[in-house]
Image (spheres, grey):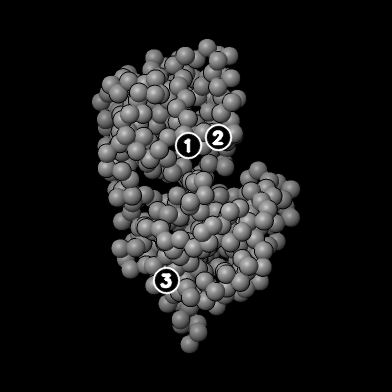
Amino acid sequence: MRVLHVYRTYFPDPPGGLQEAIRQICLSVQPFGIENTVFTLSPDPSPVELRRTEAQVFRCRSWAAPASCDLGGAAAFRRFRQLADNADVIHYHFPWPFADMLHMMSRPLRPTVLTYHSDVVRQRLFGWGYRPLMAWMLGSMSAVVATSPAYARTSKSLTKAGVRESVRVIPLGIDERSYPVAGDESVFDRVGVSRDEPYFLFVGVLRYYKGLQFLVEAASEIAAKVLIAGSGPECAALRALTQALGARNVMFSGQVSEGEKVALLNRCHALVLPSHLRSEAFGMVLVEAAMFGKPMISCEIGTGTSFVNTDGETGFVVEPSRPAALADAMNRLLADDALTVRMGLAARRRYERLFSGKALGREYTALYREVQMEGNSQVR
């Protein structure tokens, strides 16, 4: 079976969580006989075609990206139609309004799946104007996938009549084979953290919704180092806040490689994801922590984060925007090694059951086959 994935950006352009989620879906369905193609845009689409381990990638030029919505030209429509004609199933990844335009203008005669990764949260004016096209797009799909029960239940877009009937829940996941077996422990020589001392870890892009200012404020109450790994638009403000508060136990590593990330996850005491806004729709880094058998601390924001991290079982889920709540949860783990181990083991078991490559591949392959069979029966 041939599946065409459609999203606005993809590797080798700078990665993000959603691109990694697509890569993991592609890797996970391969053992089930699925052949993957990715259609995407890029400001510099050279080469226009490249073969990656998980998929064949086709790129057209992104001429503009207002509100993070990459827009293509006539060549993008032509290429999309060619790829759609050769696919058995088309898999859209939401949100990308230009993909809605591609679908509406091309009307491909193929079964369609849409994974609803996130609501349109920040661009409210844009979201208002986009709403009719979005509603049509969601209603036209063979199946719409929510990444957690919470998102299926709380997203206004997914609970509307004409859409909710086609919604399925398939959590995002990680194929463990896609990660380095051994971490690059040279990272410890440059980040100011010893291999043997307990430290709390954040990994991700430093964005406005990650709640890292609250983690920095909580650090003064923690008798351990807090390592913030990643780069992003909030980096300068966070460094300034750290200096202003005199939080000497907060360390910034900057961007880390996959090998360095593996080393940091392997040795951290726990992972902290203090995201306080609904823009954090799932939290792939929580799945990473669970895969490495680490307890997690996250905030209750009504999204998939509290599905990955189960409060009291795999870690703690605390009230958002409250440094004291973060500090209390971190100190509980710091003071109780047995609790830390127990929660880490529970996180690993939950990963194997719900978020592993095998679980991810099995669920999406079954969905692809289902919509393909339904499409074939409708044609007859």
x, y (%) of residue 192? Answer: 39, 20
Image coords of residue 205 (percent x, y): 51, 37
Would you identify the image quadrant in which residue 185 lies? Answer: top left
Which disc, if any, is residue 295? none
Q: Residue furthest front?
A: 46
What amino acid is at disc 3? Arg
- Mark 2 against mark 1, which lies toward the viewer? 2
- Disc 1 on helix, strand or loop? loop
Graded by Cα atoms within 10 Å as few (under 14), some (14 to 19) or many (20 or more), the crowding at tag 3 reads some
- Whole-Å distance between the Cαs marked 2 and 1? 9 Å
Residue 233 quadrant: top right
Q: How many marks do you count on the picture?
A: 3
Q: Is residue 296 left or right of residue 238?
A: left
Amino acid type at image mark 1 = Gly
What whole-number distance in Å separates the C-alpha atoms at marks 3 and 2? Answer: 36 Å
Would you identify the image quadrant in which residue 338 lies? Answer: top left
Using the image as rendered, state which of residue 283 and residue 73 is in the foreground.
73
Res. 38 visible in picture: no
Asked whether, in this view, residue 278 is left or right of residue 224, the answer is: right
For label 3, the residue is 2
Classify 373 as above or below 341.
Answer: below
SS label for mark 3: strand
Query: Residue at label 1?
Result: 204
